[in-house]
Image (cartoon, coloured by chain):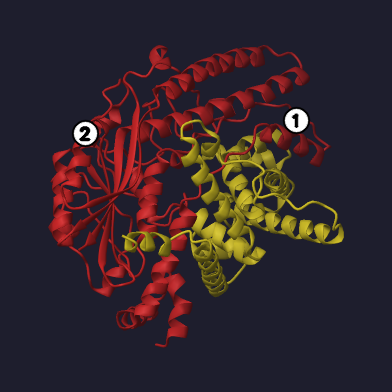
């Protein structure tokens, strides 16, 4: 195969959308052609960058103004207004940092990045994360499965990971967060998923922020209702966030990796993603993202520093986000009682005009509840794990 | 499709607006995000997304049930968004005075939050804006495939269905779109080399 032809195929190869004969001959070409291998890495980076784009929410009043326009579009019939079902908080907006961190790891792994497909039911490496140096290994672009370092057997709460390329548009790096282990950093009530060790992907009812969310139905009159527990306006414990990025020199990448794995295991942490790459001058590097319970971030920090000469690329935190979370909870309490009031008013409304007015206000309130809840979930996700991105550079 | 969705659909097809709105609520966010990534700003996105949903409403009679409702909806929406983009482009071409749409008519939710330090928020905001600008600079036909695939996560087959293209066309447009973006990203030093240089500079 010639490079021109190979370049045409790389993009579909990345998505595993090539027929197998083309895929095989491209793999053969890649084994022999560093230039095309670099191209493949570059395209992968494009994907990772796009996957790191955040979801946007429709502006306030979107539904209301859509409603007006729909009425205008169908003037023959003036329908009575009923509140729109609230959109469930976007699951993938929560914990975006993990996604971003994982995506960043993918992003920076330049030429020929090989991602490890980890099986959660297996004990964590070293053997599992052994560096795959054969270009054929590039085919394994599956989701970077989160690894629960402590577990050597399936756990009760285990769920099968979603397959890559599904509807939420996240890269494999992004997937890592949906099943991230949550090593009991939050003793707070309602943290039942932490106890399970693994949080199943949506659409699972989440109660971690004191809000009962039902799977996103648009029930006929049975719309999901957000319910605040009485104790919900205070966080049970401080929410602390810590994130850092280090570059560590090591004499031997495998050894550095096994030190990282041991460290992460010792601290009851988790691997979020793994990638290998080379610098332009050929120096091999490996990039890892690990998460440890916030309470142990200092231990993780000193453990990483002990691996070899370390450069701190960035460090954010510890940052206390409790006040923000409490403010969100208070806002939500008040919004929820507004919602309740509006619903009572709606039930008692006597004219179409009146109920239409109430509905518009109600849908605005519901939108705000959804937004605040999503942000709260994001804070909780960030506070669960202190996250380290570690680039091992061979000396 | 659930029974309930089916009954909503049946009512919506008879012109029941309330039923339609309940049905559409489930898709609204996704439709809005598609419109936002295609237009690059919130004002146009609101407009385009609403146009697209109105189009769905007024075309409900065309839905034959030979595809799933969501497939049909995304097909109508994708095409309505593209039509709307083309219409706007023509308008813009005829009125040169009209100010260009801005890239950052608004911020994604997380950016507007207080949670990040100002620097961090700025970095993320900048990054997101730069990426969106690069996407906006693509041709419509390339932009729509890359948004559907790499941001919204649809399969090649789904994208082919939505846009009425062959699989081969989806493949090649996606390939060209990614190559174009790669070029733009590396001009902007958004990735790779920047980091590698930083490592090497030690």
Residue located 49% across and 56% down the image: A50
Few, some or many residues within 10 Å of mark 1 (<14, 14–19, 20+): some
Q: Which residue is mark 1?
A: A79
Examine the rendered structure and indicate whether residue B141 appears above or below residue A368.
below
Residue located 39% across and 13% down the image: A231
Few, some or many residues within 10 Å of mark 2 (<14, 14–19, 20+): some
Q: Which residue is mark 2?
A: A296
Q: Which mark is residue A31?
A: none
Would you say B61 lies left or right of A330 here? right
Would you say A80 lies left or right of A18 here? right
Given residues A281 and A185, the one toward you in this image is: A281
- The answer to whether any part of residue A223 appears in the image is no
Q: Residue at the front extreme?
A: B202
Given residues A18 and B1, the one toward you in this image is: A18
- The answer to whether any part of residue A201 appears in the image is yes
Q: Distance between the Cα atoms at labels 1 and 2?
A: 57 Å
Q: Position of residue A6 (x, y in %)?
A: 43, 81
Which quarter of the image is occupied by the N terminus of chain A?
bottom left
Q: Which chain is yellow?
A: B
Badge 1 marks a residue whose secondary structure is loop
Given residues A61 and A290, the one toward you in this image is: A290
Looking at the image, is mark 1 or mark 2 nearer the viewer?
A: 2
Given residues B169 and A374, the one toward you in this image is: A374
Q: Residue at the bottom extreme?
A: A2
Q: Colour of chain A?
A: red
Examine the rendered structure and indicate whether residue A296 appears above or below residue A277.
above
Chain for disc number 1: A
Q: Position of residue A317 (x, y in %)?
A: 35, 34
Residue located 63% across and 27% down the image: A363
Residue located 62% across and 30% down the image: A84
């Amino acid at each position: 195969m010639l490079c021109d032809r190979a370049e045409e195929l790389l993009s579909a190869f990345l998505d595993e959308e090539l027929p197998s004969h083309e895929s095989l001959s491209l793999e053969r070409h890649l084994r022999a052609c560093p230039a095309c291998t670099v191209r493949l890495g570059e395209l992968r980076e494009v994907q990772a960058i796009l996957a790191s784009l955040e979801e946007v929410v429709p502006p306030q009043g979107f539904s209301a103004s859509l409603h007006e326009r729909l009425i205008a579009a169908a003037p023959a019939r003036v329908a009575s207004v009923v509140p729109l079902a609230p959109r469930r908080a976007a699951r993938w907006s929560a914990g975006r940092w993990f996604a971003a961190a994982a995506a960043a790891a993918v992003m920076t792994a330049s030429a020929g990045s090989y991602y490890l497909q980890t099986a959660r039911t297996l004990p964590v490496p070293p053997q599992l994360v052994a560096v795959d140096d054969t270009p054929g290994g590039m085919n394994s672009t599956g989701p970077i499965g989160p690894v629960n370092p402590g577990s050597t057997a399936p756990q009760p709460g285990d769920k099968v990971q979603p397959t890559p390329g599904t509807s939420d548009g996240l890269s494999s790096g992004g997937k890592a967060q949906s099943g991230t282990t949550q090593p009991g950093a939050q003793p707070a009530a309602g943290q039942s998923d932490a106890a399970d060790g693994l949080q199943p992907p949506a659409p699972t009812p989440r109660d971690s922020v004191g809000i009962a969310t039902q799977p996103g139905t648009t029930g006929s009159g049975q719309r999901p209702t957000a319910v605040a527990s009485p104790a919900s306006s205070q966080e049970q414990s401080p929410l602390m966030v810590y994130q850092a990025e280090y570059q560590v020199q090591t004499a031997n990448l495998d050894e550095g990796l096994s030190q990282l794995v041991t460290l992460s295991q010792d601290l009851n942490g988790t691997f979020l993603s793994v990638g290998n790459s080379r610098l332009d001058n050929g120096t091999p590097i490996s990039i890892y993202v690990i998460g440890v319970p916030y309470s142990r971030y200092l231990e993780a920090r000193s453990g990483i520093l002990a691996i070899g000469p370390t450069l701190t690329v960035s460090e954010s935190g510890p940052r206390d986000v409790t006040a923000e979370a409490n403010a969100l909870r208070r806002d939500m309490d008040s919004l929820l009682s507004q919602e309740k009031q509006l619903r009572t008013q709606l039930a008692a409304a006597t004219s179409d005009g009146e109920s239409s007015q109430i509905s518009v206000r109600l849908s605005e309130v519901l939108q705000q509840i959804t937004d605040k809840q999503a942000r709260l979930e994001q804070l909780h996700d960030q506070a669960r794990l202190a996250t380290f991105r570690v680039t091992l550079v061979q000396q | 499709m659930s029974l309930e969705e089916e009954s909503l659909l049946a009512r919506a097809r008879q012109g029941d607006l309330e039923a339609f709105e309940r049905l559409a609520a489930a898709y609204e966010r996704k439709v809005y995000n598609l419109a936002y990534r295609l237009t690059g700003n919130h004002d146009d996105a609101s407009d385009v997304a609403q146009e697209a949903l109105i189009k769905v409403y007024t075309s409900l009679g065309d839905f034959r049930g030979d595809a799933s409702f969501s497939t049909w909806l995304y097909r109508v929406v994708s095409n309505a968004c593209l039509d709307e983009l083309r219409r706007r482009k023509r308008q813009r071409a005829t009125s040169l005075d009209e100010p260009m749409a801005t890239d950052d008519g608004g911020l994604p939710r997380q950016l507007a939050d207080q949670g990040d330090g100002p620097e961090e928020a700025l970095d993320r905001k900048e990054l997101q804006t730069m990426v969106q600008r690069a996407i906006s600079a693509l041709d419509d036909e390339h932009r729509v495939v890359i948004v559907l695939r790499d941001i919204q996560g649809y399969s090649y087959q789904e994208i082919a269905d939505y846009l009425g293209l062959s699989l081969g066309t989806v493949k090649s447009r996606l390939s060209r779109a990614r190559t174009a973006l790669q070029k733009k990203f590396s001009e902007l030093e958004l990735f790779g080399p920047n980091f590698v240089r930083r490592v090497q500079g030690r």
